Image (spheres, helix red, strand yellow):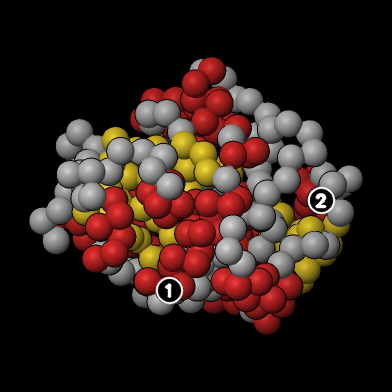
Amino acid sequence: MIDIAAIEAAADRLEGIAVRTPLIRNDELDRIAGGRVLVKTENLQAIGSFKIRGAYNLMSQLTAAEAARGVVAFSSGNHAQGVAMAGRLLGIHAAIVMPADAPRAKMDNTRRLGGEVITYDRYSGDREAIAREIAAERGAALVPSYDHEHIIAGQGTVGLEIAEQALEMQLAPDQVLINCGGGGLSAGSAVALKARLQDVSVRTVEPEDFDDTARSIAAGKRMMVAPGSRSICDSLLADSPGELPFAIHRQLFDDGLTVSDCEVRGAMRFAFQNLKMVVEPGGAVSLAAVLSGRIETADRTTAIVISGGNVDLDEFAAIQASAD
C-alpha cells in the first residue's frame, strides 16, 4: 500500500502543474445538510478534472528512453485529457483508447491537448486489451487510469489538499465522500486523509448500477458490475475495482454509498444554480449523496469532491431543463 510520503512526493512533482483547487462552502448546501459541507472543486482543474494529478505523477517518472517511445492509455475522457496534457507538458507522445460514444467535449479536448485518439465500442471491445496490444506494438509505456501506485499517489494529492485546507479553515471533516470508478482517487485520498486527520470516516460514492466497490468492500473481495449496466456517469463506469485501489479500500474504508441517475441530475442542477458551477454526471455523485440524504450530515462536517466538469453542452442543457 502506498503511504503518505509517496503522496507528498507527488504533491512536490505537481507543484505548478495541478491547480490547488478551492475548498468552498455554500449556505444553501449547509442548510439542506443541517451541518457544514466542504466542497473540493476539482472541476476547476485546467483539464476540468483531477486526472492530471495521477497522469503527470506517473509520466514525469518515466526514463528518457521510455518517454521517447511514448505512452498509451485507455479512458472514457478525463484520464485521456490528463494523459494528453501531461504528454504535452513533458514532450511525450500520448495515444489514448477511448469509447466511440465518449462525450464529444472530452474527445475534442483530448485531441486539442495533442493526444492521439483511438476509438472502440465500449459494449463489445476490451479497452485495456486494445491498449496493451498497441503499447506492445509501439514499445510504449502503459498509463492505467487507476491501477498503478504512481497514479494512486498523484490522485491522493486531492485528499492531502482537503486535509490541509480544512485544517486551515478550522473545520476538520468528520467524514469525506469521494466519487469512485476504478478507485484511484478514493484510495489515494483516503491514505492522505487518514494520515492527516484523526477519526475521519471515508466513503466511496458510486452510481447505483455500478456499485462494484461498495459491494466489494462489503464482501471483502473484488466484485463485478452486472452485465448490461448503464449510467449517465460515464467517468465512473469501471467493471470492477482496481486491484491496488481495492487493497487500500479494504483497509481504510467504511461502507460505500450509491446514488441514482435521477439524483445525479438533481445535483448537477443544484451545482449550476447554487454553486454557479458546471459539473459532469460522474463529478456530481458525492454532492448527490448529500442532497439526497444518503448519509447523515446533520451537525457534522462533511467534505465532498466534485471530481470533474467535462460534459457535452447539449447533455448539460437538457439536464438543466429537465424536472426529474
Would you place residue 56 above or below residue 236 in this image?
below
Q: Amino acid at mark 1?
A: Gln
Q: Secondary structure at mark 1?
A: helix
Instruction: Name the residue: 62% across, 76% down.
Output: 317
Residue 175 placement, left or right of 103: left
* Quadrant holding the N terminus: top left
The answer to whether residue 37 is visible is yes
Q: Which quarter of the figure has residue 230?
A: top right
The image's mark for residue 250 is none
Question: Would you name the residue on which mark 1 appears?
Answer: 273
Q: Is the C-beta separation of discs 2 and 1 under 8 Å?
A: no
- Residue 124 image position (x, y, % from top left): 89, 45
The answer to whether residue 4 is visible is no
Q: Secondary structure at mark 2?
A: loop
Q: Which is more toward the observer, 220 or 149?
A: 220
Q: Amino acid at mark 2?
A: Arg
- For label 1, the crowd category at 10 Å Cα-Cα, with few meaning under 14, some 14 to 19 and many 20 or more, is few
Would you place residue 184 above or below residue 106 in this image?
above
User: From this viewpoint, which residue is outermost toward the front?
Assistant: 323
- Residue 24 image position (x, y, % from top left): 27, 66
Q: Which is more toward the observer, 213 or 72?
A: 213
Question: Would you name the residue on which mark 2 appears?
Answer: 122
Residue 29 placement, left or right of 234: left
